Image (spheres, helix red, strand yellow):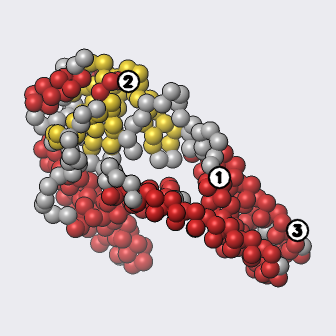
């Protein structure tokens, strides 16, 4: 995800996801006890309250500022679906016997879908943004945004790995592309070959002990190989981009960093190991050694999935042809 420059550190999202899931999971265990089966009405009320309360508290904890009415409605609709889908049979029978419960859930879901469809249609009609990003934003108006982002990332990996062979790199209009794949690709290909040999040997050995375990491990290994192939190919298809107002530092689909020109204080090419390994440095060169370091002021924040955001005051990366890149970058950030 691209970096931003917020006025204050963004709120961590991990607890907003984990704690509601833990609370709902514990409640699901409680309502499956013999005591809950003996008192289905009380268990149904308890189950509905925990699911709805956890969903709304997770929304409050994971939102900077006040949640929108559409977000609240989406959480309530999702909570209604979870109440019905994950409830044990006695509670589900209790809910089915009360038509008001079904009408309330259907009403919440229908209202969310209607409002989400209107927002999605409006987002799809917007101009000035990539069609893929417009589609992700439109689907996020109906489905959980985190789920949409994960699905889009996985589909992008599979598309690059299996369906995209040759062709132009991803360069938006108005941007200059600078490659970095000539240093990363050979090392990554060597890792791919070694991984393939290791997977084959491990599969043959495991087949002697458990055919089922060998097949499961083979499926996981094949997915890992597809992921690695997609990563290697993404080094070429996703170059570093220098735009009119921002520098977009990318390392395949692993790192995607938008750095505004205004926050770049200086650019260095003589790089010491202490600088690259410092906690305040984001090393986007991965397996290669960086040949460019940006010093940014104020620091930029990197949002990471299911992890606390971190700030960086240096960004290290490597380009295949540093001389033309540095000339264009210094011209772009010159006052």
- Residue assigned mark 2: 313
Question: Is any atom of residue 26 visible in this view?
Answer: no
Tell me the residue at 74%/65% (across/down): 29
Estimate how packed mark 3 is, as few (under 14), some (14 to 19) or many (20 or more) residues with alpha carbons within 10 Å.
some
- Residue assigned mark 3: 42
Tell me the residue at 20%/41% (across/down): 174
Q: Nearer the viewer, mark 2 or mark 1?
A: 1
Helix, strand, or loop for circle 1? helix
Is residue 107 shown above or below 309? below
Left or right for 261, reference 38? left
Q: Earlier in the sequence, mark 1 or mark 3?
A: 3
Helix, strand, or loop for circle 2? strand
Residue 181, position as x, y percentages in the image: 16, 45
Estimate how packed mark 2 is, as few (under 14), some (14 to 19) or many (20 or more) residues with alpha carbons within 10 Å.
some
Say which of 205 and 299 sits in front: 299
Separation of marks 2 and 3 at Cα, in angstroms: 54 Å
Is residue 246 shown above or below 70? above
Estimate how packed mark 1 is, as few (under 14), some (14 to 19) or many (20 or more) residues with alpha carbons within 10 Å.
few
* Tag 1 near tag 3, CB within 8 Å: no
Say which quarter of the image contains residue 87: bottom right
- Looking at the rendered image, the quarter that the N terminus falls into is top left
Tell me the residue at 73%/65% (across/down): 28
Separation of marks 1 and 3 at Cα, in angstroms: 29 Å
Say which quarter of the image contains residue 291: top left
Separation of marks 2 and 1 at Cα, in angstroms: 37 Å
Helix, strand, or loop for circle 3? helix
Please give the label number shown on residue 194.
none
* Tag 2 near tag 1, CB within 8 Å: no
- Residue assigned mark 1: 69
Q: Nearer the viewer, mark 1 or mark 3?
A: 1
Say which of 8 and 312 sits in front: 8
């Amino acid at each position: 995800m691209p970096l931003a420059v917020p006025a204050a550190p963004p709120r961590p999202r991990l607890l907003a996801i984990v704690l509601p899931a833990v609370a709902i999971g514990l409640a699901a265990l409680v309502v499956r006890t013999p005591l809950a089966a003996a008192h289905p009405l009380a268990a149904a009320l308890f189950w509905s309250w925990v699911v709805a309360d956890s969903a709304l508290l997770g929304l409050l904890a994971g939102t900077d500022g006040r949640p929108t009415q559409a977000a609240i409605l989406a959480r309530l609709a999702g909570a209604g679906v979870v109440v019905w889908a994950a409830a044990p049979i006695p509670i589900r029978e209790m809910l089915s016997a009360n038509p008001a419960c079904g009408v309330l859930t259907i009403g919440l879901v229908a209202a969310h879908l209607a409002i989400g469809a209107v927002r999605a249609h409006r987002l799809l009609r917007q101009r000035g943004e990539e069609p893929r990003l417009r589609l992700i934003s439109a689907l996020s108006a109906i489905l959980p945004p985190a789920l949409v982002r994960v699905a889009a990332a996985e589909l992008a990996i599979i598309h690059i790995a299996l369906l995209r062979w040759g062709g132009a790199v991803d360069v938006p209009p108005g941007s200059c592309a600078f490659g970095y794949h000539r240093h990363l690709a050979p090392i990554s290909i060597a890792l791919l070959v070694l991984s393939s040999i290791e997977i084959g040997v491990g599969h043959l050995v495991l087949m002697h002990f458990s055919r089922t375990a060998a097949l499961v491990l083979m499926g996981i290994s094949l997915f890992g190989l597809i992921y690695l192939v997609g990563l290697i190919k993404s080094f070429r298809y996703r170059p570093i981009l220098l735009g009119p107002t921002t520098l977009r530092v990318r390392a395949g689909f692993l790192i995607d960093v938008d750095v505004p020109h205004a926050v770049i204080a200086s650019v260095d090419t003589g790089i010491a190991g202490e600088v690259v390994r410092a906690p305040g440095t984001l090393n986007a060169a991965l397996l290669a050694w960086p040949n460019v370091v940006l010093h940014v002021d104020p620091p930029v924040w990197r949002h990471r999935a299911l992890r606390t955001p971190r700030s960086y005051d240096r960004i290290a990366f490597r380009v295949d042809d540093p001389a033309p890149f540095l000339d264009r970058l210094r011209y772009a950030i010159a006052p």
